[in-house]
Amino acid sequence: MKKVTCEGSAVKIAKKTSQKNAHGKSSSSKNVSSDIIDHEYQRSLEEREKFWSEIGSQMVSWDKMYDQVIDDSSSPFTKWFCGGYLNACFNCVDRHIANGHGNKVALIHDSPITNTVRKVTYQELLDSTTRLAGGLRKLGVKKGDRVVIYMPLIPEAIMSMLATVRLGAIHSVVFGGFASSELSTRIDHAEPKVIISANCGVEPNKVIPYLDILHEAIDMCNWKPDKCIIFQRKNVLISELNPLLDLCWEEALAEPVECVPVEANDPLYILYTSGTTDKPKGIQRPTGGYLVTLMYTMNTIYGVRPDDVWWSASDLGWVVGHSYIAYGPLLYGCTSVMYEGKPDRTPDPGQYFRIIEQHQVSAIFSVPTAFRVIRKVDPHIRYGRKHSLNSLRAIFIAGEHCDLETKHWIENTFRVPVLNHWWQTETGSAITATCLGNAQNIYVPNFTTGLPFIGYDIKIMDSEGNSMKELGPNQLGRIVVKLPLPPGNMSTLYKNDDLFEKVYFQRFPGYYDTMDAGYKDENGYIYVTARDDDVINVAGHRLSTSSLEDAILRHPDVADAAVFGVPENTKGEVPLCLYVTKDGVKKPATKLSVEIIKIIRDVIGPIASFRLVAKVQALPRTRSGKTMRKALADFARNKTVNLPATIEDPSVFIDIRRALNELGYATSAPSPLLGYKKRD
């Protein structure tokens, strides 16, 4: 079939830069974005069909060009690039080789745990992917079938994703941190014809028996796959396979197969949101709009150039891994780093610095927690200082709130702009951002996640009561997006259209409910303060947990903090703070607590009713870096807390119980550790 190509189009867009205030708003701050972004943003809302037709035709290669740019007749089930046919694997691999880039490195797998660095070229990626796709076809996988992928962060995981979509099938990557019960729930819901897994994963001082977990999960399932393809990590462990169920990776490889084009609105993948075990909520991603948007963002938001090395420090089991370890960088044709390790060990807290220097990384996408961890164990950068950071141009953060102290520390340490942006599993890419690719002066107000990105018409609604009242500048409320959503957003929830409409569109008709709280300033900048249920109502005054945490983290001895609401007789609810000190701090906890309370009174004022403070050894976080504030709040209220399989260290609740008891809370709460089953 004839291919419609777009090589280099994003680079051409990047060259159109000049100074102007963001989105046409008057502002006393420095310019953050060029007039091309302002113009494109307005066009994306006012000339939606024409704008996205141009972008869609430039960004990806089509087997058949679309007949209709947008079909919004069944809102919120919006369809983009209707009638267009394309293949994700072709766009990620084949077309780069056709353009002479087969010898370019596509993936760098850096695993200090196994003491290996492996580079995979685009040609090598194509060879392995096409042969695995051939093996899947021999096992009966065809267009529309599901393939579950349960693998650690290794190149074979991306090969498995690409081989699946090469056939027009749909992959569902399950995070390797999930135990057998969570894995079985996803298998039963997705009903995969084949499961692809590795025999093991690795963590510092630990080997995770993936194959045992997989077999246990299948035993628990009503649905049984036809076959499991197992990649043996021979440099770590060789496992015994089940000859009736398992097929080793090498034996699964077969004759290469060509790409199967799919319609733009056919699903590319299903991604289950974390913690969904009883009632799976599978985000279904459409193919065409997602590929177009990711290709567009690689340069427009992240400023990536064709010869850059890009590093998204996440896992493939999360949406960030899908979008910006796998599809985004490969669509763009740059080099993507896959780091299998921790920021503070494996073997030391200098790993982020080493990777930047060794692989000449241009830009990083990570979570603030990763940098907080490095700062806690090595605040003076004793390990990182020996490495050159000359290749680095920017650091992007998302996934959780970044306090000002941490942001300043990152900037001072890495000497590059630190740009916050905001998006969700449901959207697949940024809702708000600062666009590095078209910026001349990188300056944004403190705490903002940036301006609304192309196609997102953001409003702040009153979340109290049932009114549809839009709030004015600097008023805290619910962040919503006017429909239709731009290309790349979820198309529905897999097997559950009704829940899709109910969860995201029922409360604010005509809008997508992000369920996040925040506000918009007079210049259009968006400030995402917390999940809406993280806002504390103190005697009628709504306070964001993040604003309190920002103030607390100004204390020079505090490394980390979590604030959440607890019940109080007269005010209804008051904030409670648990904090962690930096390594080596000798000051008594009682003195520290008094100093923290004073900071809040000086910064926020007495309105916060802030007096409940306690030191703990560590805070509960998920493996993606998010603080489990709701679990803390429920525990303090004597509610049962069910720990997700994604929790980093469940044992932290032992010391947290002690701290809460001293403050008069969690006095009769059942231990979250009761009934908790470790994944290994």
Image (cartoon, helix red, strand yellow):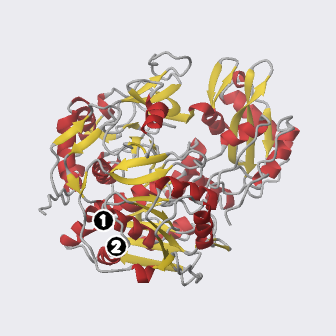
Amino acid type, mark 1: Arg
265 relative to 140, above or below: above
* Residue 281 horizontal side relative to residue 585, left or right: left
Q: Quadrant of residue 181?
A: bottom right
Residue, x 74% and y 49% (percent of image)? 580
Task: For mark 1, give the secondary structure.
Answer: helix
602 w.r.t. 102: above or below: above
Please provide percent x and percent y for residue 315: 51, 60
Residue 167, position in %: x, y?
30, 65
Give the residue at the far left of this rendering. Answer: 2
Q: Can residue 543 be seen at all in this image of the molecule? A: yes
Secondary structure of the residue carrying numbered label 2: helix
Mark 2 and mark 1 in contact (Cβ < 8 Å)? yes
Dot label at residue 166: 1
Mark sitting on residue 7: none
Q: Position of residue 143 (x, y in %)?
A: 31, 60
Q: CA distance from mark 1 to mark 2?
A: 8 Å
Write the residue at 79% across / 51% down. 674
Report the front residue among 254 and 673.
Answer: 254
Q: Which residue is mark 2?
A: 129
Q: Is residue 26 left or right of residue 353?
A: left
- Mark 2 Cα within 10 Å, few/some/many (few <14, many 20+)? many
Q: What's the residue type where badge 2 is placed?
A: Thr
| Neighbourhood count class around disc 1 (C-alpha, 10 Å): few under 14, some 14–19, many 20 upward | many
Q: Quadrant of the C terminus?
A: bottom right
Q: Residue at x 44, y 37 (%)?
A: 500
393 or 125, nearer to the observer: 125
Of the 4 image quadrants, the one containing the N terminus is bottom left
For this rendering, which residue is in front, 380 or 119?
A: 119
Closer-to-camera residue (202/65): 65
